[in-house]
Image (cartoon, coloured by chain):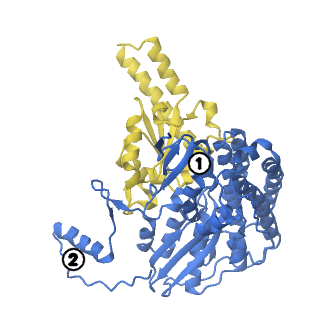
Chain colours: A blue, B yellow
Amino acid sequence: MSKEITIPIGPQHPSLKEPGCFTITLDGEKVVKAVVGVGYNHRGLEKACEARTYIQDLYIIERVCGICSHTHSTAFCQAVEELAGVVIPRRAAYIRVIMAELERLHSHLLWLGIAGHEIGFDTLLMYSWRDREKVLDLLAMLGGNRVNYGINTPGGVRRDLEPQMAEDIKTVLDYIEEQNKYYIHLALSEATLAARLGGIGYLSRDDAIKYGSVGPVSRASGIPDDVRVIDQYAAYDDIPFDAITDDHCDVFGRAVVRVLEIMESIKIIRYALDNMPDSELVAKMPRRIPEGEVISRTEAPRGEDIHYIRANGTDKPDRVHVRAPSEANWHAMAHMLEGDYLADVPIIIAAIDPCYSCTDRAIVLQDSDSGKEKIWDWQGLRQYSIDFYKKRGFDASQIKVAEKKIII
Amino acid sequence: MAKNLIEKAIDWGRRKSPWIIHFNAGACNGCDIEVVDALTPRYDVERFGILQQGTPRHADVLVCTGAVTLQTKDRLKQIYEQMPEPKFVIAVGTCACTGGVFDGCYCVNGGIDSVIPVDVYLPGCAARPEAIIDAVNKLLASLEEQQKSEENTDE
């Protein structure tokens, strides 16, 4: 008779660079049940955004995630611009596209290395991270920093792209393209890689839709789900490119989608550099953003990134919500892990390119004695704050607060 | 009591080949990829004998990134306690030093030093790999001085 064992993986674990806890129930070597525990990285930045002005928020939003910081700030700026009714200059839109694609290059190369590391192919890690350094140099040249470039501002971009920079970018792109051809060859024809990655972490097309997967995960299951195509933003409506899909539905498919996407990104950057119009960089933005609510979408390297902003007519937002792509992909994770072997768990987790700092938007308070979950509503929270200050000798119960509109 | 040969050899080994463990206490990932970056070909800290370890029980230096969130607070303490003596902590990035942009958030405890003692503070958002190498270097230099002064006072 078989006996099931439960083992926790994380929050600190050699194969995970960020804190996340997976409780895995095993029958022999097979995973029968997987519970994903995230929330270690929850910092409360949505609440922090409410206390700061839109310009200050930009610095918080960039630090949602250090790998895809540009896509978050683009989504945030787009939302603010839409609320204010401002159209950004065309050149700024092109610079945003170039930054976004360079970011995708560095993120996909990073993923390729991590994937190689998880399957014990450390040479690939060293190769792709060496190439990635060159992309980081470009990002540092354009934005002034290797991580968190700070190039976006509501109404446009903060730095221009000089002609010499365009030349430098093209030189590096030639190099990356040459290297990436080798990676494509490796991904598509190397027998050991196909044998190691093929068939694990299976997620069928129907399941991908059911669990709401986004980005390379859903595209590897044959769903042409790319925000750059279905809801074009910035300058993507001008630029010809293909959305990559694959029908392997497994980790191998996800690797193929990513290496082919690197090629598309190179194509996009080249086209954008050659066809960049001349114009201003920033459109004038009002300091107070008119009342309203808006949803803005961008295609992050990991998938669809959604930002929601509710403005109340002041210089601070009333509510900011970030739905990062990794958050959408976690829901399919338990399903992908179940039925696979324990040795495949790290690479299946890595295959969605998880970003815990993106994901952790909420935590659930759990009573340490009873284990019960606790949820506070608005009145409860207010009562708590009144009691809190009463103990310190200040009675806040007489202060009138505006009726909070809660839209869910 | 003067140090015997074996103790001296251990001191030397600790100076020449510190093993590090990396823990993300709630960072945005920016400093974490820079820490991993320092291990890959361009910066390649392995040539200085610095090796990343998977478990705190094998590590000398805890490289810690990010503002400490309430969730990771206890884990960080546990990891620090699991490390063998003597142990050192490097706080990488502005968030790890002071809390950075997240200071004051309801779920953030503060910098790393609000939970465990820190030896080297490395500001920067994100801290560059060169700076990370420099931080480890400075730590080793201070360790060497400390070891020398110990030997001198012993005699």
Measured Cα–Cα span from mark 1 to mark 2: 46 Å
Residue carrying label 2: A396
Q: Position of residue A233 (x, y in %)?
A: 68, 77
Above or below for A225 versus A123? below
Q: Position of residue A255 (x, y in %)?
A: 72, 54
Image position of A301 (left or right of B99): right
Hey, what amino acid is under mark 2?
Answer: Ala
Q: Position of residue A357 (x, y in %)?
A: 51, 58
Above or below for A118 versus B155? below
The answer to whether residue A300 is visible is: no
Q: Where, by quadrant of the figure, is residue B37 drawn?
A: top right
Hey, what amino acid is under mark 1?
Answer: Glu
Please rate how many residues cluster around mark 2, counting C-alpha atoms within 10 Å: few if below 14, some from 14 to 19, many from 20.
Answer: some
Residue plotted at (51% across, 27% down): B15
Q: Position of residue A208 (x, y in %)?
A: 63, 65
Q: Secondary structure at mark 2?
A: loop
Image position of A140 (left or right of B102): right
Nearest the camera: B75 or A377? A377
State which chain disc 2 sits on: A
Q: Where, by quadrant of the figure, is residue A236 drawn?
A: bottom right
Query: Looking at the rendering, in which quadrant would you find the N terminus of chain B?
Result: top left
Image position of A134 (left or right of A74): right
Residue plotted at (52% across, 56% down): A356
Residue plotted at (72% across, 49% down): A198
Query: Looking at the rendering, in which quadrant would you find the C terminus of chain B?
Result: top left
Nearest the camera: A353 or A345? A345
Above or below for A293 versus A159? below
Question: On residue B34, which mark appears?
Answer: 1
Q: Secondary structure at mark 1?
A: helix
Nearest the camera: A75 or A304? A304
Please rate how many residues cluster around mark 1, counting C-alpha atoms within 10 Å: few if below 14, some from 14 to 19, many from 20.
Answer: many
State which chain disc 1 sits on: B
